[in-house]
Every structure is written in C-alpha cells, then in structure tokens.
Amino acid sequence: MELNFKDFPILITERLILRNIENTDVILIHKLHSDTIVNAFVGRENSSSLKKAEEYIIKIQNLIAKNECVYWVITEKENNNLIGSICLWNFDVENEIVEIGYEILSEFQGKGIMTEAIKKIIEYTFEKIKAKIITAFPSSDNINSVSILKKMNFVLEKKKYNNTHQNIKNLVTYTLRNSQTKN
C-alpha cells in the first residue's frame, strides 16, 4: 500500500471539497464533536470544548505527518464550512486493509453528502493507496450509516478484523473488496 500523505490529497466531488484539517477549523471541529446525535453513534462523550478541539486537530495533524491516518474535513464548495469529516486509518499494510471512518453534522444528514464523500474516498483508497479491503465498524443501530455502506456495496462480515473501537454499542463489521484485485 502507498501511505504517503506529505502532499495532502485534496479531493473534489460535485458538491464537496475534502481537504486537510486546519488550525482554523477549531470552532467547527468543536461543533462536530458536540453534536449529540453524532456522538451517540461514534462512542464519544458530549464534553467537547474549544481546547479539546484544538488538541484533536494537533493529534490528527501528527497522525497525518506520520502517515498513520489521512483525515479530510468535508466542506461545501460554495462556503468552505466544515460539515463533517472522513478518514482512512488503522492501516494493515501486510494484509492491504484500511479502515474508513466518517461523521457529519446532524443537520446535513439525509442529503446524500456522506454517500458522495465515501464514493470519492473509495476511489482514492483503491486507486492511490492500493488497498485490497476497506473496513467499516458502525453501530448496527446507526441505520443511516449501515444504509450508506450497503449502498456502496459493503458487505456485513462475520470475520473479525482489527479495530480499536470502544464505547460503540452493537458494533458490526462491513467490508468492501477491491474488485480489481484477486484474493
């Protein structure tokens, strides 16, 4: 797999720009991490603060610098306001597996935005990173997330994959295999 994010990949879709996280995103990260609906599904406490948002941005920037994660903020083309995030992380280089994670502010859910972003990330993951499998670990209670994954042809798996998630109720595993590679 090709894991070098020094030249950060900015991705553009019909309505969205997926860009690198910036220090100036602190208020919007705080808003995203304060969204009780989102937090319920990602196992995060509702205790965000501007200080915690700043620390989170620094943490993500450090992970990207070490090629341990690639994290995009999702913005609308017309205003650059952060409405969500999507990342690739938990790289299993030996088995060519990468995990996708994503979240979007509740007021933007149900508008096809995350489907559009995930579709672009899938292309990037298979074409540029050269992964064979993308994993996702949503709560089965998160009907919208599960629906998006199914729409993107992810399959519910019984097999255990490496994940580090805690505090997520009813965690399930979905995978998407690169149709261009043989297993």
Image (spheres, helix red, strand yellow):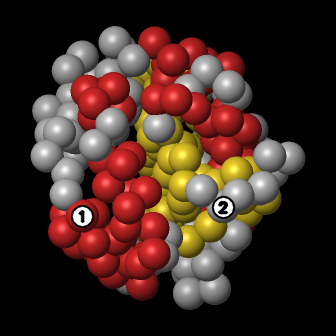
Work out whether mark 1 precedes mark 2 in sequence or the reverse, and give the earlier one.
Answer: 1
Q: Residue 120: where, in percent of width, then height? A: 73, 49
Query: For mark 2, does the 10 Å Cα neighbourhood hold few (<14), some (14 to 19), or many (20 or more) residues?
Result: some
| Amino acid on which disc 1 is placed | Leu
Q: Residue 53: where, in percent of width, then height? A: 27, 63
> What residue is shown with label 2?
80
Instruction: Pick the residue in front: 142 or 100.
Output: 142
Q: Is residue 89 above or below residue 182?
A: below
> What residue is shown with label 1?
50
| Residue shown at 34% from the left, 71% from the top | 57
| Amino acid on which disc 2 is placed | Asn
Locate residue 131: give its quadrant: bottom right
Q: Whole-Å distance between the Cαs marked 1 and 2? A: 20 Å
| Residue shown at 63% from the left, 85% from the top | 7
Q: Residue 22: where, in percent of width, then height? A: 48, 76
Q: How many marks?
A: 2
Give the SS element for disc 2. loop
